């Protein structure tokens, strides 16, 4: 715990946390338990982060509920009852509100408060952080700044001319009206077929008079096969939850997914297909663990991709529509594989039209709808399922200035640079939760968030135990880590997908593969070794 006598007299807080999602809530709890004076700010009017904002029909997570939940409190994990294999947004939001109440977090959370800027005061080694609440602004002085601002929280709209001219209603999946939307009788256009689009389209189509889906890139999607949880299975898992959690922490992606440690190319084709079929029937993202080289070897990957393309041809009746929905030109898994309920079958409905905008580009949004090269699509509503400026978007939306006034936006102009994805040289006492260069979006993010929160709080405890005030990533250690992250990615097929993992969805964003794909367990061991060795790669003062 920070010794109050050592604080500069002008200090307001030990720690300011940006964001009140899974990461911010746990960081607040943990650091407060350690005795720090902590506040958490969120621009949202409620806690929950992702699950506060993304209220579109069909929004749910694609990691199983019993794993997509906090493990830090054995009591919490025993008392909370998940109802579904893949919980829907309202259930996850209820869970996070329960956590905020159970651990009495609300008094230290300021909602409706945007963190606009943070400037390092080098003379005192503190951060001056500008908070904006409506038209009111204030500056708080804090020793540590923790960006728990989310990898997928900076929503983006596409650059389509005429965006403001549409006379109907528009919605973004990541800023969905809290009262819900009734599409009954409406002609709805959905732009985007990533994770949010594939979840929302089947439900919108069931309600709307007509749904037109504008697709730029056909994605691989797997059936979720969501179902209510079996109470016996829940009891059985809860009886060994502690061991299960410990096991999951050292797996490649932070889930209990069964990874088959065999090459797809060494098994006879019939056996290989049987494995794919079993995983397709099981549902969920476990498909990608069918063989150990699906994300490493193109020929192996082709076998999985071809199996999935066959499924699309089987499900979708119209061969031309099936063809347009068939992903090509990138390995399966190199872009986020979506998990859906009835996505492909939705295109068999007579009231659903697919527009492949690669073949028939959107020219502009007009007053009555969307104009493509070949047609005017008249619409009452447009849904933008156009995703996020991922991983770095929310961090760089804050004007952060470190040593010598250097702006983080400037430092990261050619791509993000961070040591372990946790800290960045030139910005002492600033931490990133699930930052670039950590497993983040390639993992079960709750596992990765807990690991970061615990590592950061342990590091703060260590600084105070040793009478130190500040910590900063060493530039050489950072360079080595950034190089290592790229080298590991280059041993895989991940960089081959023009995905949001590399910033490809945001015009002008530097193309750098951002997550660490060496595995959650491997990464955790690296972080543990660094902590055990008194934090090499960090300059502490
Ligand atoms: P967030 O939940 O994004 O919270 C960040 C908060 O910071 C937000 O509330 C935001 O308002 C706030 N904020 C940002 N900048 C500022 C600022 N400048 N000032 C004030 N407040 C700010 N992950 C999985 O592991 N499995 C899944 O199945 C899965 N499904 C997902 C489905 C959807 C639709 C989306 C969008 C994401 C999904 N994710 C999934 C990723 C998900 O974001 C994480 O699992 C997790 O919720 C992230 O928590 P977080 O606290 O890090 O960030």
Image: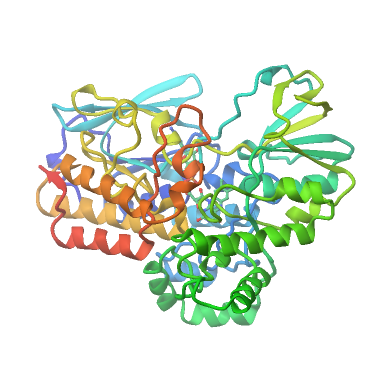
What is the x, y in percent for residue 59? 65, 50
Q: Left of 28 or right of it: where is 326?
A: right
Which residue is pictured at 51% across the width and 23% down the height? 134
Which residue is pictured at 44% across the width and 63% down the height? 253
Whether residue 150 is visible, yes or no, is no
User: Camera-side residue: 238 or 32?
Assistant: 238
What is the x, y in percent for residue 5? 13, 41
Q: Residue 123: which quarter of the image?
A: top left
What is the x, y in percent for residue 458? 24, 56
Q: Left of 67 or right of it: where is 356?
A: right
Q: Residue 530: which quarter of the image?
A: bottom left
Q: Quadrant of the C terminus?
A: top left
User: Camera-side residue: 361 or 42?
Assistant: 361
What is the x, y in percent for residue 397? 42, 29
Image: 404 above or below 84: above
User: Camera-side residue: 232 or 272?
Assistant: 272
Q: Count the marks: how many?
A: 0
Whether residue 93 is visible, yes or no, is yes
User: Camera-side residue: 181 or 366?
Assistant: 366
Image coloring type: rainbow
């Amino acid at each position: 715990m920070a010794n109050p006598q050592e604080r500069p007299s002008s200090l307001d807080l030990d720690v300011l946390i940006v964001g009140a999602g899974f990461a911010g809530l746990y960081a607040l709890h943990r650091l407060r338990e350690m005795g720090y004076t902590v506040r958490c700010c969120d621009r949202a009017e409620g806690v929950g982060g992702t699950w506060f904002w993304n209220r579109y029909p069909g929004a749910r997570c694609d990691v199983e509920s019993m794993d997509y939940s906090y493990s830090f409190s054995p009591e919490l994990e025993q008392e909370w009852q998940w109802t579904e294999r893949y919980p829907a947004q309202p259930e996850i939001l209820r869970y996070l509100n329960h956590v905020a109440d159970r651990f009495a977090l609300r008094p230290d959370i300021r909602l409706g408060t945007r963190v606009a800027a943070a400037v390092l005061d080098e003379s005192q080694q503190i951060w001056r952080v500008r908070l904006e609440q409506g038209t009111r602004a204030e500056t708080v002085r804090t020793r540590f700044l923790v960006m728990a601002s989310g990898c997928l929280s900076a929503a983006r709209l596409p650059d389509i001319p005429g965006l403001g001219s549409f006379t109907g209603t528009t919605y973004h999946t990541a800023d969905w009206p809290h009262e819900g939307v009734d599409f009954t009788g409406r002609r709805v256009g959905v732009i985007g077929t990533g994770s949010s689009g594939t979840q929302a389209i089947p439900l919108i189509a069931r309600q709307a008079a007509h749904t037109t889906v504008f697709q730029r890139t056909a994605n691989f999607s797997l059936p979720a096969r969501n179902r209510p949880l079996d109470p016996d299975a829940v009891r059985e898992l809860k009886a060994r939850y502690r061991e299960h959690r410990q096991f999951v922490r050292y797996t490649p992606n932070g889930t209990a997914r069964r990874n088959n440690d065999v090459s797809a190319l060494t098994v006879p084709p019939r056996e290989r297909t049987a494995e794919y079929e079993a995983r397709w029937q099981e549902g969920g993202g476990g498909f990608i663990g069918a063989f150990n080289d699906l994300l490493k070897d193109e020929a192996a990957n082709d076998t999985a991709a071809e199996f999935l393309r066959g499924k699309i041809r089987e499900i979708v009746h119209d061969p031309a529509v099936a063809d347009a929905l068939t992903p090509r030109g990138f390995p399966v898994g190199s872009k986020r594989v979506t998990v859906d309920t009835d996505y492909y079958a939705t295109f068999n409905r007579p009231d659903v039209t697919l527009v492949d905008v690669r073949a028939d580009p959107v020219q502009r949004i007009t007053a009555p709808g969307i104009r493509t090269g070949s047609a005017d699509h008249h619409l009452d509503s447009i849904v933008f399922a156009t995703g996020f400026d991922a991983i770095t978007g929310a961090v760089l939306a804050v004007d952060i200035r470190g040593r010598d006034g250097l702006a983080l936006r400037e430092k990261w102009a050619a791509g993000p640079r961070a040591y372990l994805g946790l800290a960045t040289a030139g910005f002492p006492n600033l931490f990133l939760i699930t930052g670039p260069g950590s497993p983040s979006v390639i993992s079960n993010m709750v596992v990765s968030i807990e690991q970061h929160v615990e590592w950061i709080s342990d590091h703060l405890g260590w600084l105070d135990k040793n009478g130190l005030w500040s910590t900063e990533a060493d530039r050489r250690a950072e360079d080595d880590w950034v190089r290592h992250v790229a080298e590991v990615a280059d041993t895989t097929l991940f960089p081959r997908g023009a995905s949001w993992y590399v910033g490809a969805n945001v015009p002008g964003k530097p193309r750098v593969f951002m997550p660490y794909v060496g595995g959650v367990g491997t990464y955790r061991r690296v972080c543990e070794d660094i902590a055990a060795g008194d934090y090499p790669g960090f300059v502490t003062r």
